[in-house]
Image (cartoon, grey):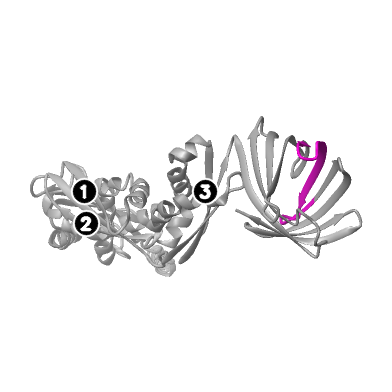
Amino acid sequence: MIRKHGSFAVLLSVVWLLVFLMPVSAAERILEVRSEVHAQTGLPVTVQERMQKSVAAIAEQLLSGRVLPLQPAERREKERVIHEVFDKVLVGYSVRSVRIEEQPTACVHVELVPWDDLVQEVRVEVRVDGMPPEVERLVRRDLADVGQVFEESLSGLPLAAADWTNGVLKKQLRGYMEQHLPEFWADFDVIPQTVAQVTISVYPKLPVIRSVDLNMRSDTIPNMFLLNHRTLMQEKTDLLVGVPVAFVRRHEQELGALFADVLDQQSDFKALSMTTRVTMDVGERTSLMSRSDSKIYRIRIMGWADIGRDRDAKDDVVFRLHAGRKLSSRDEAFVLLDLMPQDVEGRWAMGYQREVFPETDVSLRYDFSDAGMVAAGSRRFLKDWMLRYEYHFRPRFGETGLRYRLHDFLSVEYVVRRKDNWLRLIGFF
């Protein structure tokens, strides 16, 4: 018996020793905390997200690292603390209940009750400060759905909670402006009512346009004809002064079409079937070029003076009127009228011209003064250069000219005729 008892004692000691030496498994703890906030009447998404972040921050301090499972008394205490703390920071809502769901990722469920009446509708008014009507229309178009920013954050919200959403609204509006209208700042004011009134004030960012330099040109009518409309066009383009540079760059096509339409709607432009194209070099000092051309007519007035030519020449100073009617996009019938003021003499011709290749024209005309045909051709190249040739069948001679355009109103040409050559200054009116 003694031996049996001794063996049992030894065995029991060994068991206790093994149990004592076995590693104790690590206790399961709360590793992460998230939250879900709900209300019986529903919550705006942006407001709900902000509330859930607030609850998660409070719960993180209380629950992170706690050993699971929580004791019932401990869990009730944590729920009470979250209830009291969150209830104090809320405006417009009261906390009805808090429930902690125990998992390695703990979830805190919060149920809210609104205090009073809710926002049923949101009406948004946009005020654009300091912009002309044409620019204001573009601004309002860019802000067409800005009301959604406020509807998402205010609809269904208790009236007393409206101020609590200011931070959310500012962030949401700033993000909307950066995406849709980055050239302007925006402030807002909210009057919380069942039908909430929101007023948004929009004003420009720097840099803005300080001045506009206007240039008007035409390749199919005399440029002097455009002077009658310069004052009107300048008044219209001056609306860009004070508008953000980046905004004008972004809306250059719309604004260019607006300015072009101002000219194209004039009665004389309509009579000549004129269309205008506007281009801009946008900066604080903006350059604006309008080019107006007729779809049907080509009327040009030019004059030239020859330098270094025989003094006996009767056509060293000439004013020429070219009046053409387009038969198609490449064909034209025309009349030429030349006036030589030094001899008070004139001559005229009728002819036909065709664009055979891009930038390459050929023509044939009958000169009534010399009673002979004239064949001509020209080729434009390198943007500002042109090579031309004319052959007069009566009297028989050819003339070659190499022309360089100094600007839209003045060109210089080197002319070779028979054994003579000279420089010609050509002005376009």
Q: State the image coordinates of residue 185 (x, y, percent, origin top left).
A: 33, 61
Magenta segment range? Answer: 366-387
Q: Is residue 335 visible?
A: yes
Of residues 317 and 28, the one drawn nearer to the viewer in this rendering = 317
Circles 2 and 1 in contact, beta carbons < 8 Å = yes
Mark before the other along the chain sequence, 2 or 1: 1
Q: Which residue is mark 3?
A: 225
Q: CA distance from mark 3 to mark 2?
A: 60 Å
Q: Which residue is mark 1?
A: 154
Badge 3 marks a residue whose secondary structure is helix
Furthest-left residue in this view: 116
| Classed neighbour count for the residue bearing mark 1: other residues with Cα under 10 Å, few (<14), some (14–19), many (≥20) | many
Residue 377 falls within the magenta-colored stretch = yes
Mark before the other along the chain sequence, 3 or 1: 1
Q: State the image coordinates of residue 297 (x, y, percent, origin top left).
A: 60, 37
| Classed neighbour count for the residue bearing mark 2: other residues with Cα under 10 Å, few (<14), some (14–19), many (≥20) | some
Q: Which mark is residue 165?
A: 2
Of residues 148 and 367, the one drawn nearer to the viewer in this rendering = 367
| Classed neighbour count for the residue bearing mark 3: other residues with Cα under 10 Å, few (<14), some (14–19), many (≥20) | few
Amino acid type at image mark 1: Leu
Q: Nearer the viewer, mark 3 or mark 2?
A: 3
Q: CA distance from mark 3 to mark 1?
A: 58 Å
Furthest-front residue in this view: 343
Amino acid type at image mark 2: Thr
Furthest-right residue in this view: 419
- Report whether 136 appears left or right of 109: right
Q: CA distance from mark 2 to mark 1?
A: 8 Å
Mark before the other along the chain sequence, 3 or 2: 2
Q: State the image coordinates of residue 139 (x, y, percent, origin top left).
A: 35, 51
Q: Nearer the viewer, mark 3 or mark 1?
A: 3
Name which residue lies at 32% across and 56% down: 131
Q: Is residue 155 visible?
A: no
